[in-house]
Amino acid sequence: MFVLKRLIESDAQVHIDMYERKSKIGAGMPYSEEGANVEHITNVSDNEIPEIVSSIKDWIKTVPEKKLAKFNIIPDDFSRYHVLPRLLFGEYLSAQFTLLSDEAKKVGIPIRVHTGVTIVDIIDEPDKNSVRVETEDGEVMDFDAVVICTGHNWPKKNEGKVSGFYDSPYPPSKLQIKLNHPVAVKGSSLTAIDAIRTLARANGTFEKDENEKLKFVASKESEKFRIVMHSRNGLLPAIRFHLEEPQLSSDSLLTPGQVEQNRKENGGFISLDYLFDKNFKEGFKKKDPKFYKQIKDMSMEEFVENMMSMRQGKEPFELFREEYREAEKSIEKRQSIFWKEMLAELSYTMNYPAKYMSAEDMLRLKEVLMPLISMVIAFVPQSSCEELFALHDAGKLDIVSVGSDSSVEPDEKGGAVYKYTDEQKKSHKVRYKTYVDCSGQPHLDIGDLPFKSLRTKGSVSQAVLKFKSAEKAETLLKEGNKLVVQNNNGDYFLKVSGIAINDNFQIVNDYGMDNERVYIMAVPYMGGYNPDYSGLDFSEVASACIVEKLTHLIEEEKFGQNMGRSYLADQL
């Protein structure tokens, strides 16, 4: 939708075909029944999302009262600071697509929408300067440019083969099952909370006592039901607070000049320490000078250790209650918790230059900073927190620390066996009849890209990052790291997930050449170069990069064979 919006605003003379696997465009997986039930809510509010056509607050006034009642929404009480039920947010997005389509007609951009259609292959044809698209029913179309926006993908490996084993919690309707035994949940993120809210409702009810405190009451047939979250660090994610600057801006990004200068100073690499200083620490000079004095001389590792030490040593749910109270005060006083807000901005801004990092810095990023980022920027909505408290108080929800070397094996009898070593170095091997992997959207490999011709013809290439130090690479090789590879020139590289792309989200072929016809915004397939992509903010900026390049090529008359027609694949 953001690409469509940008094309409309660009005044480019194009014809657009949109292909959508489902019957409706706009909602995508997270905000449709593929990703949500009635109980699931967003972790963003109206004031935090980039504008599409109209605001949620204005749109709410147009929604029938019967539909709003289903989600307990009272229009007169609704403000731009309220989070929405995810299915209702999906309705909003679909309505925005309709408005965008109307805008396109007004400016003379023809759009053909193909719903219920699955694209099975994309074939780049450089000699013809065009791209061929094949649908499941045998239709073949040629286009000047293709933008792949296929969204989430949750591959199934054991689900369906092993009873009680779920490779993801989506669609959540599959978790509406009555159980009378403990359930293992991998992860403690928003994905895990989605699963917990659904499982809880299938096995009991949430009720308020005389003091308006939420309680969970298990069903009689689910007396032994309880959920055990398995987290690498044994901690729950951070909670929604008041954001001073709710919409992350492209102004936060490093300028091309800054990136180029730093790369010149660092042997062609962008320095992770530079990103940490420039896009994180420097922001506190004006916003929180006192905090800046505390951290200005800290390395990234020292800062992370300091922040994690504040959380460790405390019982997870007690810490969660403390943060809940802190977040309540932040919202009540409209005062941000700046270090968390700045960390969210850092996770957003480091995506774009990440492809220029050294392999060593990418390993540091994943091992040191990402665990803190993933925990802090989850922004758990308050209503989700209250349900977690109620479940824990009822003895139906616990969390255990499993470390980074834990493993899960499907059990032939059903469910899974969880193996881990706790913080006291004691080994555990626990069988669960029901297991749900809630570790979030996996970063997928190049071999998972569903359009086989892009792979077999070498149109796409493996995403890799070069090592600064051959010694470091050789050490990892000796340790058995299979992601370290060496080319014919003797240089060492680290294979990262997905395919290689350039700054304009164009695919890059085996020879390192950018493709002017094929663009990709399907985040699971480019996670190696975008380690922490961020929802709607990410989509807004990525779409600007793509459309800027497309319109430039149109102006140079690089297209035209197919009447400037571009193609947006929203879902497979």
Image (tube, helix red, strand yellow):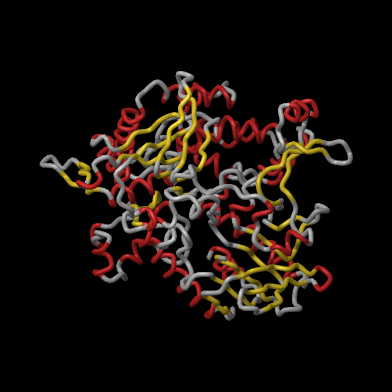
In this view, the residue in front, 379 or 253, is 379
> Which quadrant holds the C terminus?
bottom right
Residue at 34% x, 32% y is 320
Residue at 27% x, 60% y is 71
Residue at 27% x, 40% y is 224
Residue 373 x %, y %: 51, 36
Task: Classify residue 64 by image quadrant.
Answer: bottom left
Residue furthest to the top: 424
Residue at 66% x, 62% y is 548
Res 263 seen here: no
Q: Is residue 134 above or below residue 47?
A: below
Q: Is residue 197 left or right of residue 308?
A: left
Q: Is residue 196 above or below residue 481?
A: below
Residue 540 x %, y %: 55, 57
Residue 544 x %, y %: 61, 59
In this view, the residue in front, 194 or 338, is 194
Res 507 seen here: yes
Residue furthest to the right: 489
In this view, the residue in front, 477 or 58, is 477
Task: Classify residue 34 by image quadrant.
Answer: bottom left
Residue 256 x %, y %: 70, 46
